[in-house]
Amino acid sequence: MNKLFSKGSLIIFGSLALLVLIAWILRVSCFNVPIRAAIYPLSVEVGQPIHFCDSTMDAQMVTWEFGNGDVANKRSGDYTFNEVGQYQVRLTINDDKTLYFIVEVKDPKSSTDKKLVKIVGPSKAFQNERVVFMADGDADNWRWEFGETGRLDSEERNPIYTYSNIGTYTVKLTTSNMKYPETHTITIIPELTLDIGRPENKKLEYVRDFLQNIIDKKGEYNNNYKKIKILLKANDDLIVLINGAKENRLDAYCKNLRMIGKQNSIIIQEVAEELGTNNKIKRLLVNQNDN
């Protein structure tokens, strides 16, 4: 009697069954492929575009709905919202899978939101002393004239300048959003010598060095802090203005330098003093690099 299935027939049927199984596995795998898509940024101003993109495997039909009636049927592109609000953006893949994003659209910043620029710097300084000027405010560029050369002197935000001659000078700062320059008057007086035998124009350099010693834990803290107060002829309540933006009392500022300075690799770049009545220091101006 002939066998119902020959050996060759069994091989053929087995191969077909294997192919069917592979096809089913592939179908299930494709069905379970997650959506891979992104929108950025998720917070924009009116008129600022978002970028949307999809890279989902086996995506034959792609529909982006932007929550305001607008639709796009492409995998990637840019879109701009024209009104303020929160929008739920829906992505649909192959009329089956969906993914949602929330986009926040805000009012564009107006000029009234910006902090107007002012000059922060001492009203008096010594001849040949390195003077730190700071620009406090919002702007894109900086054009400084220090009044001694008659030309543009610096385009840095917080420049350092040394006056060679005594006299009274008008410092001018112009930025892209100013019609007229901001001005500041500084009087340069002759070099003097401190009672402790150090040139007066070196005083602030020593203050800077002692501040750096505190950061680097070089020497005893109390010794460094005492020398700073002696040089400045100030007490614990002296105001320290850091990078033209934040303020602390001298005592609190130095204690925090000791605690976190070494960890953050703080570098004291320059210090200057703002004088008040009777040529008494009003504020210590510190320009530091916080890494």
Image (cartoon, grey):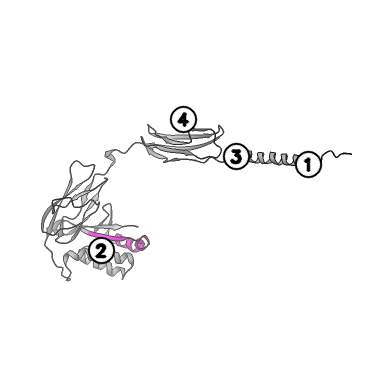
Residue 71: mark in rendering: 4
State which tag comes first along the sequence, 1 or 4. 1
Q: Which quarter of the image is occupied by the N terminus?
A: top right
- Residues under labels 2 and 4: Cα distance? 60 Å
Residue 30: mark in rendering: 3
* Mark toward the viewer: 2 or 3: 3
Q: Is residue 110 visible?
A: yes
Q: Nearer the viewer, residue 7 or 173?
A: 7
Q: Residue furthest top?
A: 69
Q: Nearer the viewer, residue 19 or 90?
A: 19
As helix, strand or loop, the secondary structure at mark 1 comes to helix
Expressed as whole percent of the image width and height from the top left, the position of residue 282 reads 20, 57
Dominant secondary structure (helix, strand or loop) of the stretch shown in magenta: helix
Relative vertical location of residue 191 with respect to residue 247 in this rendering, above or below: below
Kind of residue at disc 2: Arg
Kind of residue at disc 4: Val
Which residue was labeled with disc 2?
A: 208
Q: Residues within 10 Å of mark 2 (few under 14, many from 20)?
A: many
Residue 8: mark in rendering: 1
Expressed as whole percent of the image width and height from the top left, the position of residue 182 reads 18, 46
As helix, strand or loop, the secondary structure at mark 4 comes to strand
- Residues under labels 2 and 3: Cα distance? 65 Å
Total marks placed: 4
State which tag comes first along the sequence, 2 or 1. 1
Kind of residue at disc 1: Gly
State which tag comes first along the sequence, 1 or 3. 1
**Residues drawn in magenta:** 253-271
Kind of residue at disc 3: Cys
The residue at the point 49 percent across, 34 percent down is: 90
Q: Are the two marked residues, 1 and 3, in contact with CB atoms closer than 8 angstroms?
A: no
Q: Residues within 10 Å of mark 4 (few under 14, many from 20)?
A: some
Expressed as whole percent of the image width and height from the top left, the position of residue 277 reads 14, 56
